[in-house]
Image (cartoon, rainbow, N blue to C red):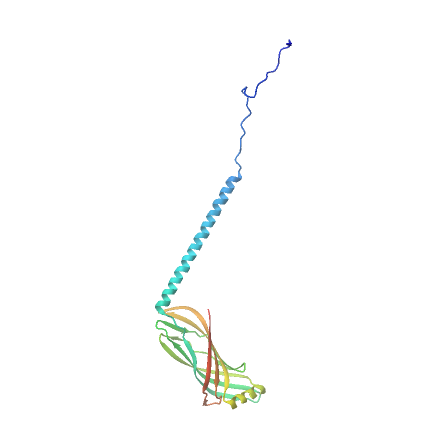
Amino acid sequence: MASGYPKNYSMFSENEGGLKPPPYRRNIPRYQSYNNSKKSSSSCCFRCIGCFYCCLFLLVFLSAILTFYLYTMYRPQVPNYGVNNFSVNTFNVMKDFSLEAEFVVVVKADNPNEHIGFIYGKESYVIVTYSNSELCSGKLPAFHQPVKNTTLMSVVLKGKSEFGSGMQEVLMDNRHTGKIPLFVKVKVPVSVVLGSLPLRQVVVFVNCSLVVDNLQPNKKARILSSKYSYNVEF
């Protein structure tokens, strides 16, 4: 039965009508631009690291080539050092059990290189010890040794040290056997000269274990045996 009242509303189907909700707007997050800048800075950092390692590899490669070239061209050889002669000027045991000693040691330096020379510096020393007790000391002369050269350096060593009764007994036993062990320590700064160009200075240490037949003053001491060891400090 139809009602007599007028309708004050309208019904629409889902597909009808002109009203639609506003489209959903998506805002671009601001952190995306931050991530892009972070990625670009990271890639730039990686490129810098890559360039650094490439330059480092190139430097090592060129250094290796230069070292190989210098080695094949100049053929460096280690100099030979040795005690060529040993003589005693003074060896007196005093009443207070002190010892006055003066030795003359002839050090031989042989440079077999054809293109490399050596400069021996001033800050050097030569020390002679007996039974771990220092007897005397001195210095090597500073000089320039040219290529293919053998130089004999006469070094005067002087000193005064304590020489107790125990050491005197040991020395007397060594004198009876005719075998007196001595230890010679040498330290000298050396600069390698490549052609006419001095290179970096190094410190050379030479240790020599000597056995001589006597320590009598004004009598030549004969070297019975010798043993050497070398070390270089850069």
Classify residue 119 as left or right of residue 12.
left
The residue sitting at the front extreme is 1
Of 180 and 205, which appears nearest the observer?
180
Q: Looking at the picture, how far across and down is residue 221, in whole percent?
A: 46, 87
Q: Is residue 47 above or below residue 102?
A: above
Q: Position of residue 60 (x, y in %)?
A: 42, 60
Q: Residue at x 51, y 42 (%)?
A: 35
* Residue 117, x across and y down, in percent: 37, 72
Q: Position of residue 131 (x, y in %)?
A: 54, 82
The residue drawn where x is 43% and y is 52% is 51
Q: How many marks?
A: 0
Position of the N terminus, as image quadrant, is: top right
Q: Can you say whether 24 is above or below 214 in the image?
A: above
**Residue sitting at 52 percent across and 88 percent down?**
174
Q: Is 31 left or right of 86, judged from the image as shown?
A: right
Q: Nearer the viewer, residue 200 or 51?
A: 51
Of residues 23 and 233, the one nearer the viewer is 23
